[in-house]
Amino acid sequence: MTSRRLASISPAAMALAAFLAMTWLYWHGYTEIYYAILRRWGIEPFRSPFVDASGWLAAWECTRQGVDVIPFDPCDVLQRGYASSPLWLALAGVPLGVADTTIVGWFLGLAFIASLTVLPTPRGSHALILVIAATMSTMVVFALERANADLLLFLLVLAAGLLAESRLMAARLLGYGIALFAALLKYYPIVVLVAAFRERIAVLTGVILSAACAVAAFWAIWHDDLARGLPTIAAGPYSTDLFAAKNLPFMIGMIVEETAAPSRYAGALGWALAAGLYTVLFVAALAICRRVLLMPGLAAAAAALSGRERTLVVIGSAVITGCFFAGQSIGYRGIFLLLVLPGLLALSRSPARGPRLLFLATAIVIVLLMWGEALRRAFDGGFGFWLLRELGWWWSVSVMLAIIADFLQQSPAWRGATEWLGRAPAAAALAVWEPLGQRRERGPRDGRGGRYC
């Protein structure tokens, strides 16, 4: 077996070994050891594995019995209401229920682990170590222990990404269709359609119109269920493993409000500070994004990416960035960072010092974020740890925004649109990102007049 092949399967092999070992411990009655290991991993285990898969199967089971599961699901072990897409309930004819939780959760976990073998192979020993660390992280183990639906969404998004890099138009269109199906199942994968910007304007327009029609039909059919379910989507404290753009500013605002109490202006002061801090952080993220786009050597580093690395880093960045700004996401959604890491680590091989250090540092920060809950418990992290974690999220998302912006700026659709408007792509980008009189030298150009992507 070649070293490259070994590197490509090593992360999945280690994840499989851990998954099978934990399965053996639980099914042979060593539950105390099983629970202790999970707590060391930064996870508070439920009394039985795969509880999230159980919830989705319970929704099917009670729906077949004619129960309205949106406000309350008596078939669910936690008796949770159903807050996800009504499309899942429409598939309730599939003959699976709570009794099938173990087999469904186990095979879903195995499918997810197997899918890791098709991710881009880490280039170099340091990249392999970081990818293995990410694969064995708290976020990934949490998703597997819960058998959360995000594992299924990961498989669909990965399939869409692999098809999106195909030379065949039919395969790419199938990929966009899979991304749309994933979006109708759990909403947030709609951002994966950013991959369609690699198409010509006519094709992109067709994809956008088709997606808009599908979403409109979805709303027309299930708007009542959506109106009841969307407000019940879970949210939580700003200091837990939930990641979101609002965590940092709103937590600071809440602290200030509590400090200023019982003044009658305490609430207004806390809200104003939170809103102002959110604005400052967002502007800082755009400034970092702009700085990354203007970095010498970025073009050459991006040109060295393989098609798979480029596609997956863009759609992974889109998912994480979209979730970050849309609302709070539980830590297991960080499994989509596994799509981002190979591209970041490939970019970190740039001969230019700036991109090399930037992308390597960002990859390390992402791995630390994926281990965040384990580190917090191990070091009894307090406010300082939380603040560093939130700043790490803002930094990582800023770099991912730059990756998305660079992809869009160099896409055929963008070039076609700017040419149609009578402006060159570089000139349009400069008008947005560079102040007048501060033009900087851009990276090397490809043969079509755009920077390499």
Image (spheres, rainbow, N blue to C red):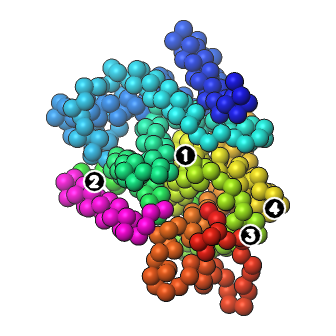
Q: What residue appears at the point 29 percent right and 60 percent down from the top-left corner?
A: 210
Residue 220 falls within the magenta-colored stretch = yes
Taking the view exactly as shown, the residue that stands out farthest to the top is: 28
CA separation in Å, label 3 and label 4:
10 Å
Region of the chain picked out in magenta, as a range: 198-223
Marks 2,3: beta carbons within 8 A: no
Nearest to viewer (mark 3 / mark 4): 4
Nearest to viewer (mark 1 / mark 2): 1
Q: Which residue is mark 4?
A: 352
Quadrant housing residue 64: top left
CA separation in Å, label 4 and label 2:
49 Å
First in sequence: mark 4 vs mark 2: 2
Taking the view exactly as shown, the residue that stands out farthest to the front is: 447
First in sequence: mark 3 vs mark 4: 3
Which three-letter amino acid code belongs to the residue tagged 1? Answer: Phe
Which three-letter amino acid code belongs to the residue tagged 4? Answer: Ala
